[in-house]
Structures are given as C-alpha cells and as structure tokens.
Image (spheres, rainbow, N blue to C red):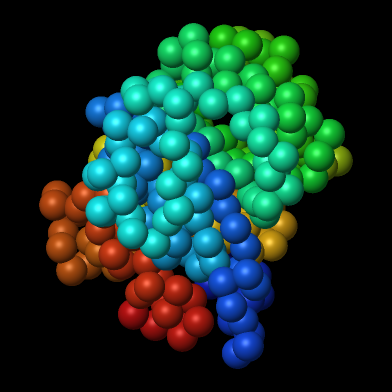
Amino acid sequence: MQETVSVKFLQGILRPRPAAGHKGTFGHALLVAGSYGMAGAGILAGRGCMRSGAGKLTVHIPHLNNDIIQQALPEAVLHHDADGRCWTSKFEDTSFPAIYNAVGIGPGIGIAPETTEALYSIINKLSGQSVPMVLDADALNILSRNPEWFAMLPPHTVITPHPLEYRRLADGGIDTGNVILVLKGHRTTITIPGNPPQQYVCPFGNCGMGTAGSGDVLTGMILGLLAQGYTPAHAAVLGVCLHAISGDIAASELGEHSLIASDLVDYLPHAFKYITKDTL
C-alpha cells in the first residue's frame, strides 16, 4: 500500500511539548559521526538532532575533532574515541546502551578496518535489544560489505540510503524487508515492513536539497525524534517530511541554487511551525 503524506497526517503524528517537560523528558541520543576531516558531518547531524527536539545529545568523535565540534555544537556532550582520526571504540562501558534512548551511526565515519570492527561490536551489543537505531552513509557502506550482520539489527531499525548506497546494499544480497527503508531522492519514500508493507511518499522538497550534508541533517533529525520516543515509523515519516518542508521554506527565501545543508537546520523551526499552523 502506498500513501502520499499530507500535512494533516503529520499533524496527527507530531506531539505537543508538555509544559512541565525537561531535558530528561525528551530523551538522550547517541550519535557516532565524523572521522578526522569529516567533522562537518557530525556537526550537521548533531544540529539536526538537537533542532528536532532531543533533550540531550552525546556525540562520539575521534579526539582530534574535539575543538571544532565543541565550538560548533556547544549543546552536545562529547565522547572521545581513543583514536584521533576514526571510530574505534567498542563501547564496552556499562553505561552503553542503558543511558541512551536512541542511537544514530554513519555520517562521515569512514570505512577503516577499525571502524568496521567498531560497527560490528555495537550492532552485536544492540542485537536483540529494543534501542531504536538509525543508520546512514558509511554505516550502510560497511554493511553492504558484511551482509550477514544485517539480520542482527534491532527490529525496525531505520536506514536512510541514497540510490547508490541502496544499490550497494542490494548488490551485497541484503534484503531490506525487515527494516524501515528511507530511500532518499526526488519524492523520498519510506517503506515500513509488514504484510503487506506500507509505503509513504513525501510530496515536499526540491532539487536545492541535493547538496553535501543534506542527508546528515536528516539522520540527525530522525535520531532526535527516536530519542523522544516516537515510533521508528513515525520518526522516519515525520523526519523526512520536516526535512523536506524546511528545504522548501529555505528555497522560497534563498533560492534553490544557493541552498546548503546548514540552511535545512536553520529553517527547521519554520517547518515545525508550518506543520502546526499549516501556513508559511
């Protein structure tokens, strides 16, 4: 079954913020993003997460990325890897995953052997648990090379490939029928597993969003919604459409030619208002 998402549908998903809410109310997200030289991916995803309403964000980074991310993302807590350039930590401490409400992995992490081992370790740690997870970018590229890991993912894990990443997964023999698939592109589709599967089509967005870092922002947004307790299906649909509406509002003021990924974060508050008020 396929359904085009309407603003009314999104209004039915979006939750009001309780007047007595505090940062603990809105969840603690863990983001693993940004190898050395790709700190921007972590910044964009982290800002997308916080702007989506998460109460607290911890970003795991190579320690050489500390200064830039500390300054660009002061709202986040930083968790430093022992390695300065890539993700190698196995997260063996007792606080993982108990203190986190959702986990996001992938933007800018690279595919180094040590990072591949770390991804396996975290998937193995989360296998059989109910911690919501969103995977993107290099996390998907690593999975495409290790298809046997796919079955270990927590139920209803959200994956957000663009067409090339999706083709790599398919070429690796991976069946994506057991995850929530966000296939990015013109009229992004969100496929929810089931019998039969349910597919939602996002009618919003524009070609100005075809720019580096746009997907990193989306990953962070879905992570932020997951941390707040949205179901994976609702987090995926709401995140995709808010992301696209933000792009439309940004393009209406800046033009499609000049749109950059940071604009999607900057205009996200307007996207929330658009959904609640149904007006620009």
Q: Pick whichever, 205 or 129, lies toward us.
A: 129
User: Residue at coordinates 30% horizontally, 27% vertically from top-left?
Assistant: 36
User: Residue at coordinates 53% horizontally, 36% vertically from top-left?
Assistant: 105
Q: Pick whichever, 232 or 53, lies toward us.
A: 53
Residue 204 in sight: no
Q: How many marks?
A: 0
Q: Is 157 drawn above or below residue 14 in the view shown?
A: above
Left or right: 270, with 57 as reference point:
left
Q: Quadrant of residue 12?
A: bottom right
Check the picture and name the quadrant holding the C terminus.
bottom left
Residue 261 in sight: yes
User: Residue at coordinates 63% horizontally, 88% vertically from top-left?
Assistant: 20
Residue 239 spot, x, y in % from top left: 52, 57
Residue 264 spot, x, y in % from top left: 32, 58
Q: Quadrant of residue 193?
A: top right
Q: Pick whichever, 34 or 269, lies toward us.
A: 34
User: Residue at coordinates 42% horizontally, 77% vertically from top-left?
Assistant: 274
Q: Pick whichever, 58 or 171, lies toward us.
A: 58
Residue 11 spot, x, y in % from top left: 59, 76
Q: Is 217 drawn above or below residue 252 in the view shown?
A: above
Q: Is 192 drawn above or below residue 33 in the view shown?
A: below
